[in-house]
Image (cartoon, rainbow, N blue to C red):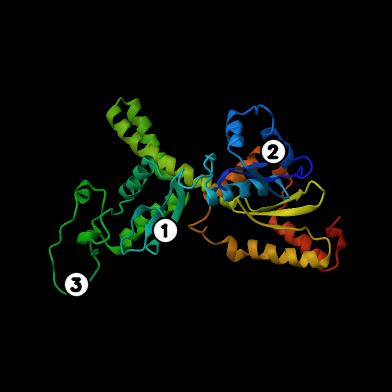
Amino acid sequence: MREQCPPRPGVYGMIDARGKLIYVGKSKSLRNRLLTYLQAEPADPKAGRIIQSTERLIWESAPHELPALVRELELIRRWRPEYNVRGQPGLFRRVYLCLDRGPAPQAYLAPQPTERARQVFGPLPSKEILRDAVRYVNTWFHLRDCPQRVPMIFADQLELFSVDRKPQCSRFELGTCPAPCAAGCTKQAYAKNLSQARAFLCGLDTSLLDQLEHDMLDSAENQHFERAANLRDVWMPLEWLHRHLESLRSGRHNSCFVFPARTPSGREYWLVIRQGHVADIVYPPRDQETARRTLRHLHNIFSPVTDNQTPSPCEDLEHMLLVLSWFRANAIARDSAIAPPQAIEQCERLLTGDLRAVG
């Protein structure tokens, strides 16, 4: 191990006598980490159990700890080693909050977005509080929650024959649904409700949370405890939903940068981070050839069209959270990051002959 395993960042795997990968790990120094498994009595009891079942050790170097961390997650998902817990597919189930494309759109949850979805939010943890939040989004913004098969008839919709229509549920009588199934509202009025719901989900309007919190505290102060409890039961899921969506937005839009790093041998390279994901690894511009190649990669990743896109519904949330947590734990590394326009400018200056861009 001392002779062959490099003291570099990377990932390693343990293979048992059946040829099955039973554990994947990562380390800043592969040699030092793997030698700890070979002690007479490993300090970690779990490490002792793993090495007892191991027939072969394998490893793969990485230029930096962060790509090794992402590679570890990828390998765990692919092979599902029995001794790994974090990163196992299906361990933490995620779902998406969607607004559909129907004539009277509603908020609903889906394990994966389909063509039915007009707008997608998430992914989000699949919890009971999320289901409550979606129910209250439909209730408080006066959106329907009936099945898709129920036909929609708006008040301003022309019909050949006059038909006496009745709402399909009691929400119309409770004042929480405008009954688009029974010509209870115009298409424009329903679109206004949808616009308000969309503004809340996009984080543009949180007045509903402020109003609920104000009414809840006012009711408690006036000793209307039952009403205060009911308002709290509505406020908590909606506030939870807003907090999680805000965290996703922050991670996506505030995590686009280029992180300069070095290999253990001292060679410099750039980790390109977009929306919290390691999008590429490129070399910094040192001559016109590397500048041209790196500039092409940066334009593809940070182009205005790409930056304005809605994140892919299949985006890797665990990948994003992993990268963001690493930069939170390594604040000094984040301070050395280069903004995309500055990285692009370095490449362009070198291509135009301005050598002051590199040093």
Mark 3 or 2 closer to N-term? 2
Quadrant where the N terminus sits is: top right
| Residue at image coords 25%, 67% | 156
Mark 1 or 3 closer to N-term? 1
Compared with residue 227, is residue 338 higher up or lower down, i.e. above or below? below
In the image, 127 versus 266, the foreground residue is 266
Within 10 Å of disc 1 (Cα), the crowding (few <14, some 14-19, many 20+) is many
- Regarding residue 29, the answer to whether it shows in the image is no
Q: Which residue type carries mark 2?
A: Leu
| Residue at image coords 61%, 47% | 72
Q: Quadrant of residue 212?
A: top left
Compared with residue 163, is residue 200 higher up or lower down, i.e. above or below? above
- Regarding residue 259, the answer to whether it shows in the image is yes
Compared with residue 299, is residue 142 higher up or lower down, i.e. above or below? above
Q: Which mark is residue 191?
A: none
| Residue at image coords 32%, 50% | 138
Compared with residue 15, is residue 272 higher up or lower down, i.e. above or below? below
Within 10 Å of disc 2 (Cα), the crowding (few <14, some 14-19, many 20+) is many
Q: Which mark is residue 159?
A: 3
Q: The residue tagged with tag 1: helix, strand or loop? A: loop
Q: The residue tagged with tag 3: helix, strand or loop? A: loop
Quadrant where the C terminus sits is: bottom right
Q: Which residue type carries mark 3?
A: Glu
In the image, 136 versus 200, the foreground residue is 136
Q: Is residue 203 left or right of residue 292?
A: left
Q: Which residue type carries mark 1?
A: Pro
Q: The residue tagged with tag 2: helix, strand or loop? A: helix
Q: Is residue 307 left or right of residue 349?
A: left
Question: In the rendered image, which residue does mark 2 sit on?
Answer: 34
Mark 1 or 2 closer to N-term? 2
Q: Which mark is residue 113?
A: 1
- Can you name the residue that lies furthest to the bottom here? 160
